[in-house]
Image (cartoon, rainbow, N blue to C red):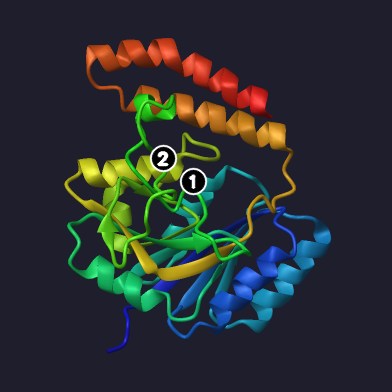
Amino acid sequence: MSLPAISALVVSYKTGPRLHEALYALKSDPDITEIILVDNGNPPADEAWIDRFVAACPKARLIREGDNPGFGTAMNRAASAAGGDLLLACNPDCVIKRGAMRPMTDALENAPRPAIVGGRIFGLDGREERGARRNTLTLWNAIGLGRWALDGTPEPDGPVRVGAVTGAFFLIRAEDYRTLGGFDEAYFLHVEDVDLCRRAIEAGGSVTYQPKAGALHYTSTSDAPRGEVQGHKADSLKRYFRKFAKTPGEKLAAALMVPLIGLAMRLRG
């Protein structure tokens, strides 16, 4: 049975040569119907390569608006331009394995909607990377009073429900993405994927981790300064905890703890 039309959404910002591998993998995968590439800012030589790739690949489309509005906004732009029934979020340094789409679509089929399915991401050593499967992020597990990341636990044999999957590699129906309103554009970088997963679950939907769908992930390939990235992460965490603080106790805890978390993140930079 053929799969529904799948649009791969890729956002690139000073990604470097790993982008070539990611795009060639998508181009050669027969299950990927189209590639929507958003150029959020690359050096001239990389832009020239992107232009040549798009010109030579009939299923590739380029969005280049001359700005860098952040990852979530760029993904929403890509989703708006996509024609597929399903949307595959794929980082520009993420090389999908051939055949990954079938197990992801199978896991999506009977999952409560709005539904998100994430796959297994691994490094050059073949080991599962941190962040592919997580519990729901709370203030308590953020400060170590509970487990957030699940990569240190035994890997499941098949799809399992989790609290969050990584934005580097996940599949969602285009209709469900629209229902959720896409990524929250108030996040510039980081945590927008955790936010999307939480909103899907709170809307009565589900987040599923499918270990049988894999992708090689090269981490930290962007040329952006580390301190700048950590600053964006700190701002995103502050927004997330304030946004999802519901009870008076949670709001008080967020008011007390969030500045400390933000300071710790910035000091890491």
On screen, residue 120 above or below 13: below
Give the percent coordinates (x, y) of residue 229: 64, 36
Q: Residue at x 31, y 54 (%)?
A: 178
Instruction: Name the quarter where the N terminus is drawn.
Output: bottom left
| Residue count near mark 2 (Cα–Cα under 10 Å), binned few <14, some 14–19, many ≥20 | some
Instruction: State the mark number for residue 233.
Output: none
Between residue 4 and residue 109, name the one nearer to us: 109
Give the percent coordinates (x, y) of residue 22: 61, 69
State which quadrant residue 268 falls in: top right
Instruction: State the mark number for residue 72.
Output: 1
Instruction: Name the quarter where the C terminus is drawn.
Output: top right
* Residue furthest bottom as drawn: 1
Q: Are marks 1 and 2 in contact (CB under 8 Å)?
A: yes
Give the percent coordinates (x, y) of residue 158: 29, 67
| Dot 2 amino acid type | Asp
Give the percent coordinates (x, y) of residue 50: 71, 69
Q: Residue at x 43, y 59 (%)?
A: 79
Residue at image mark 2: 184
State which quadrant residue 102 falls in: bottom left
Q: Residue at x 59, y 26 (%)?
A: 265
Tally of numbered tags: 2
